[in-house]
Amino acid sequence: MAPTAQPVLQSEDLRVGLARLAIFFECAHHSCLGLAGGRPYDAVGGKLTVMWPAVDAIKQQIPLWDYLQTQSWKPARRISRGRLMGLCPLHLDHQPSFLVDPVKNLFYCYGCGRGGDVIRFVELYHDVSFAEAMALLQRSSRCGSLLTEVARFYQVQLHRHPEAVAYLLQRGICQPQVIEELEIGYAPGRCLRHWLISLGYSLGELQQAGLVNGAGLDTFSLRIVFPLEANLYGRTIGNAAVHRFLPGGKGGLYRWSRVKHYPEVILVEGLLDLAVLWQAGFRNVTCAMGSHLNAHQLRQLCDGVPRIVYLAFDSDANGSGQQAAQWLSRRLRQQGATALRVQLPDGRDPNSFFVGGGDGQQFQQLLEKALL
């Protein structure tokens, strides 16, 4: 969220304002967090562009300890003054090195040397910018129920619009059970705002969440919509940009909490790839929503649990998908994970493989021939 314009301070006011900010930083951060004398958060060039009232409000609304619990972090032990120690969720950790102080609302890892408040944690954990971290937290603070309502609305719209159903059939997605389980919907445009306002949401809330633009129109118009954890993904069926997310980053691997217990996991690039594999009976599938994984997704795959990860990336004509798979395979092996590259036919991705006549047995054969 961009900061609102502020009046230019006169020289005396500027000196007083900077002095107050210096005192604020002196008091707000633990000495071992590495912030003394540095830039506030990641403001470019050290410029003070942060809206401090909004920052304070977010930290009060979402305490660090509460947010860590939503991410399934559990302390290994409690130490003095109510502080907590556990494995660090920011890197592969084997001994508890992650210190959380619920009273001060701060964390610090003695292993990787990183620390800060809940906003800094979201930046590091989700590999996003300061502004994106704020957007994620604001959405989880105020818009959890809002996104649920949006997803439900789009699911109803899917069956009312033949063009959306026809697109899914064209992409090989035809099983009602899979469409329901994945909560696939459709954004026809020009109707979301009126529905949500009738439920009591304000236009400002919808714009801040990124659901409607400045003109009040749906930002996901003419898109197949998949609900994500604290976000939405839209795939166009028209001529607009192919992919769209709400502000705040794509998050972790798709439905990782359900998939991570399998001894073998199939990783694909797109949600349409995942959907056809679900239809073929492969439920041990997750999706990175792109060929380049963010830091959070890499940590999920390198969590120390023995498993085989099959990289079923696109076999693009330009080779970008397989190059990304090779890079990721090396990266996972360096972290102690077992990764195998699935060789799809030239020009195919998992979705087009099944649409083109492939079946589950043939895909299983590709898994069995996967390469290091």
Image (spheres, helix red, strand yellow):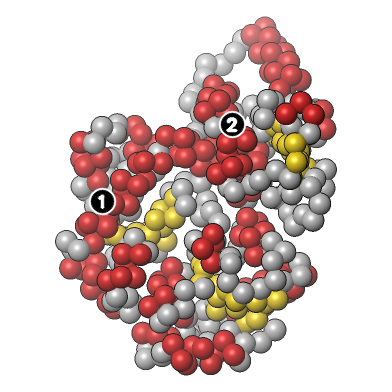
Which residue in the structure is indicated by mark 1? 153
Which quadrant is the C terminus positioned in? bottom right
Q: Residue at x 57, y 39 (%)?
A: 67
Image location of residue 263, percent across then percent down: 62, 74
Q: Residue at x 36, y 41 (%)?
A: 145
Sort mark 2 into few (<14), some (14-19) or many (20+) by Cα contacts within 10 Å.
Answer: some
Secondary element under disc 2, as helix, strand or loop, is loop
Secondary element under disc 1, as helix, strand or loop, is helix
> Depth check: 70 or 372 in front?
70
Q: Residue at x 28, y 76 (%)?
A: 174
Amino acid on which the number 2 mark rests in the picture: Pro
Q: On the rendered structure, is 12 left or right of 174?
A: right
Image location of residue 38, percent across then percent down: 77, 31
Which residue in the structure is indicated by mark 2? 63
Number of numbered markers: 2
Position of residue 188 relative to residue 34, above or below, is: below
Given the current orientation, which residue lies at the most extreme top position? 12
Q: On the rendered structure, is 76 left or right of 268?
A: right
Amino acid on which the number 1 mark rests in the picture: Phe
Can residue 239 be seen? Answer: no
Q: On the rendered structure, is 364 left or right of 358?
A: right
Position of residue 275 relative to residue 295, above or below, is: below
Q: Residue at x 46, y 91 (%)?
A: 361
Position of residue 23 relative to residue 234, above or below, is: above
Can residue 304 be seen? Answer: yes
Q: CA distance from mark 2 to mark 1?
A: 31 Å
Of label 2 and label 1, which has the lower sequence position? 2
Image location of residue 243, percent across then percent down: 42, 61
